[in-house]
Image (cartoon, rainbow, N blue to C red):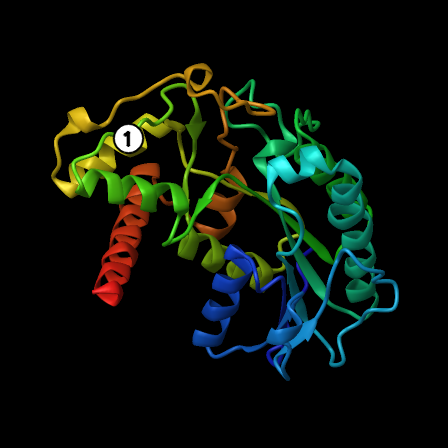
Amino acid sequence: MNLKPNLQETHLVIGIDGLIGNALRDFLLQSGKKVIGTTRRKEFVSSQNIFLDLSQNVRMWKPEQPVSVAYFCAGITSLEQCRIHPEKSLKINVEHTFEVIETLVAQGAFVLFPSTNLVYDGSSSFQNAQQQPTPHTISGQHKAEIEKKLLAIGNSVSIVRITKVFGSSDPLLQNWIARLKHNQEIFPFLDKVVSPLYLPFVVQTFYQIAHKRLLGITQISGERDITYADLAYRLAQKLGVNSTLVRPIPVQQSGLSFENNPLHTTLDCTRLISELNVHLSVWEAVDLIIKDNLLFFEGNQYAKS
């Protein structure tokens, strides 16, 4: 069942302090939409940015004006922070998240909730949206738990599972660019995979899903996994530097430990393609990600000169 959107709808972006929330707010504003956001930074509060801190009691929180569509982009996104502080993650990413969404739905809002491929263990590729979650991380466990609670709400919530999203100032890529431009080696993982998503593509797709009021679960993923070494070689090629500067290493050799290193991260995107006719290949996404990160790097270098 698809509900028809209100032509005068107000969009609420919960979590404009984060990567996706900030980009989504900007996209909606540039598209001429009426937008309000939430921030947990009191210095950013204004008539267009209302305060919301999910670590605090949110039972009495509600927006001061009616909201037609809400995009829930807040919460603890760091896998490491969720692992170290599972009780805090449970409170913020499940309990308080659900309370806020319940409030919004009760007021008549349609809510889009971004989830993650980490609700699965990554043992199989192209996980179907209807398969039972098999999380191997605390973050994934909590996403699976909040998904279950939201699906029970019914026809006012859309869950959108996504793979790894790269912005235009990704710390890893910025570090690689700086090193390669100075003829220094980089050491990407040869046994850690990713199905990278381009941030502007993700936020535009979020809007389309909300506009069509797609209920249940929709998944966004590239059509294949690549290794971080593949990504690094592509970057070196785009920079025109010697590929020998890319020195892939296994995760075990890095001295770093990961809560889970899945064999696959891809999701089945049949619904996305059939209902929205949306598709972006992994290498198209990678090239756009690299282009934006190079522009950001060069802009920073210019600003410093």
Tag 1: residue type? Ile
Residue toward you, 205 or 235: 235
Image quadrant in which you'd find residue 124: top right
Residue behind mark 1: 186
Q: In the depicted view, which residue is nearer to us: 76 or 29?
A: 76
Report the quarter where the N terminus lies. Answer: bottom right
Measuring from the top left, give residue 154's x and y in whole percent: 79, 52
Question: In the displayed image of the protein, which residue is found farthest to the front?
Answer: 305
User: Seen in the image, is 270 located left or right of residue 303?
Assistant: right
Is 270 positioned to the left or the right of 39 in the image? left
The residue that appears at 72% across and 33% down in the rendered structure is: 141
259 or 25, nearer to the observer: 259
Query: Against 152, is 100 above or below?
Result: below
Total number of numbered labels?
Answer: 1
Determine which quarter of the picture holds residue 139.
Answer: top right
Q: Who's the residue at 70% across and 40% down the image?
A: 143
Compared to residue 16, the image places residue 127 above or below, namely above
Element at badge 1? Answer: loop
**Figure quadrant of the C terminus:** bottom left
Q: Seen from this angle, which residue lies furthest bottom?
A: 47
Q: Which percent across, then down, holds residue 147?
A: 73, 42
Q: Is residue 218 visible?
A: yes
Q: Give x and y (percent) for residue 79.
A: 61, 36
- Left or right position of 205 against 236: right
Give the x, y percent position of residue 74: 65, 56
